[in-house]
Amino acid sequence: MRVRKGNVRDWPFIFALGKVGIPDSISPWRKQPMEETLNYREVILKGFWTWIQQSGSVVFIVEVPIEEEKSSSDTKKTQPIGYLVLHTSSREELTGVFQGWVMDFGVLPEWRGKGAGRVLLEAAEDHCREQGVPYLGLAVSSHNVKALRLYEKFGFAEERKLMVKSLD
């Protein structure tokens, strides 16, 4: 498993995977039909690569070698299994302190719990340190227990709570 910086050739993978994790991330408080949610997510994703480029954000791709029969080529083929989009010039909303912010993060379901998320977070942390960015933040749905466990194991701590009330 290795991590590399992503580029525009990774966009189809990011676009497809960016919709896969939505059911795990949606709050149970939001009663919108999943089809509407996925349509909304697709609209957001359509402009995401342009935003990534314009904002100076960085994409990390985690990939694994593809097992092939003996090949005449010395170059090993790889398969992407996850991505992380890091915005390094974000400002914390109350203090104005610069921080990195994980804008989007996804791992193929069959690779979750096998270290892909960990290596992506390590790459994001290393990049922030290299850039002199003192903090790394992210947002996660409070019911996404697997993601919460990963982030807490990685040293993230709850700083604020985002609250919602249904007005139905």
Image (tube, rainbow, N blue to C red):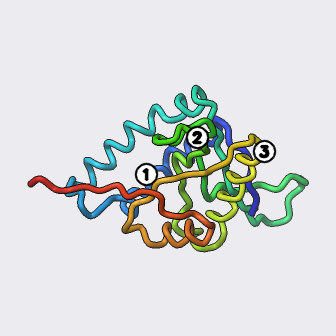
Q: Nearer the viewer, mark 3 or mark 1?
A: 3
Q: Nearer the viewer, mark 1 or mark 2?
A: 2
Disc 3 secondary structure class: helix
Numbered label attached to residue 130: 3
**Where does residue 147 sit, x and y in percent of width and height?**
50, 67
Q: Which amino acid does label 1 sit on?
A: Lys
Q: Mark 1 points at which residue?
A: 19
Are the residues at dot 3 and dot 1 in contact (C-beta closer than 8 Å)? no
Measuring 52% from the left and 30% from the top, which residue is drawn there? 51
Secondary structure found at label 1: helix
Helix, strand or loop status at disc 2: loop
Name the kind of residue labelled 2 in the image.
Val
Contact between labelled residues 2 and 1, with CB atoms less than 8 Å apart: no
- Tag 2 near tag 3, CB within 8 Å: no
Alpha carbon of mark 3 to alpha carbon of mark 1: how far?
31 Å
Q: Nearer the viewer, mark 2 or mark 3?
A: 2
Disc 2 from disc 3: Cα separation = 17 Å
Residue toward you, 76 or 64 = 64
Q: Which residue is drawn at 54% across and 56% down?
A: 106
Quarter of the figure with the N terminus? bottom right
Q: In which quarter of the image is residue 42?
A: top left
Q: In which quarter of the image is residue 111?
A: bottom right
Task: Tell whether 128 sits left or right of 153.
Answer: right
Q: Which residue is drawn at 31% across and 60% down?
A: 27
For this rendering, which residue is in front, 92 or 3? 92
User: Which residue in the structure is indicated by mark 2?
Assistant: 97
Which quadrant: the C terminus? bottom left
